[in-house]
Image (tube, helix red, strand yellow):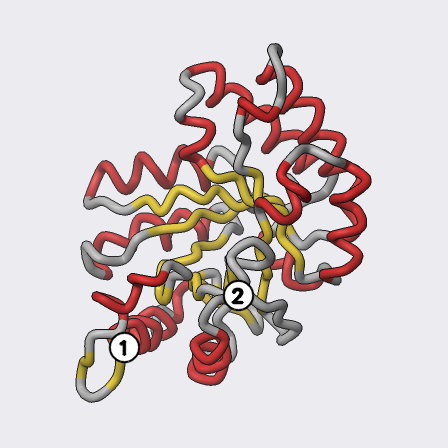
Amino acid sequence: MDFLDALKRPPLVLGVDPRPKLHGREALAHIRRYTLDLMEALAGKLAAVKFQLAFFEALGPKGMELLFELASGARVMGLPVIFDGKRGDVGSTAEAYARTYLEAFPGSALTVNPYLGLDALMPFVEAADRARGALFVLLKTSNPGSGFLQDLPVDGRPLWEYLLEALAALGKAREGSWSRVGGVVGGTYPGAVRRARALAPAFPLLVPGLGAQGGGFFREEGVLNAASRALYYPGGRPDLEAALKAAEAFV
């Protein structure tokens, strides 16, 4: 599996952010069944499945076991996987994160934080290249306060644009017409999504915020639209039938 094949699929990403309180007494068992059933039902409508690591980490060792089981299940179904952990560190620690999520699951993607500098990203870039995976680097995030740092002017442009151009220059990560290094740009900032696509045409974009956060759906080539609550918990609860309807409405 090569993660870049996700860019040939329908541009919708299922975000899996499990809330145990919505799943009854046997919460982990129900999360497992529901997620596997949901991925199978939606498989033909999805580019990838994005697992928010924090929600699994909060469940302890059994939660991490569940994460890896569900990620393996997605891959058996032919669905690319994005591990959404926003990892970032230097040296051997970055290498360990890269082994855990990129090399242990070849062909998968990982979200990473760039604020330790480009040198701290290189272990992730190299692992993605070896494992035919991808990175999505935080650029312009969907939260209202993102501009505090991300919009700071650098040579007359916002910091996130400066960062985007620096990342796009990492030609080593390029594979065919697409880079293995992409970016996260929140769908709540449609102008930023269009600007990022114009500045770096070969740069895949992960665009969260679809649905519950009010983000729009972008049909530009190379854009993956991520919906979590609106697709995983339509109507605020686990509901396969409603999730299918929501996916059809998005796509």
Q: Specify whether 17 is left or right of 41.
A: left
Badge 2 is on which residue?
Answer: 175
Graded by Cα atoms within 10 Å as few (under 14), some (14 to 19) or many (20 or more), the crowding at tag 1 reads some
Residue 1 at least partly seen: no
Q: Nearer the viewer, residue 89 or 143?
A: 143
| Residue under the point 34% across and 37% down | 97
| Residue under the point 59% across and 52% down | 227
Q: Position of residue 194 (x, y in %)?
A: 50, 80
Q: Amino acid at mark 1?
A: Tyr
Among numbered discs 2 and 1, the one appearing first in the sequence: 1
Label 2 vs label 1: CA separation? Answer: 22 Å
Q: Specify whether 57 is left or right of 238.
A: left
Q: Position of residue 96 (x, y in %)?
A: 31, 34
Q: Quadrant of residue 74?
A: top right
Graded by Cα atoms within 10 Å as few (under 14), some (14 to 19) or many (20 or more), the crowding at tag 2 reads some
Badge 1 is on which residue?
Answer: 162
| Residue under the point 61% across and 29% down | 70
Q: Amino acid at mark 2?
A: Glu
Q: Quadrant of residue 57?
A: top left
In the displayed structure, would residue 105 be above or below residue 251? above
Q: Position of residue 64 (x, y in %)?
A: 47, 22
Q: Position of residue 82 (x, y in %)?
A: 53, 46
In the displayed structure, would residue 125 be above or below residue 170? above
Q: Nearer the viewer, residue 42 or 5?
A: 42
Element type where label 2 sits in the image: strand
| Residue under the point 44% across and 66% down | 185
Q: Specify whether 61 is left or right of 213.
A: left
Element type where label 1 sits in the image: helix
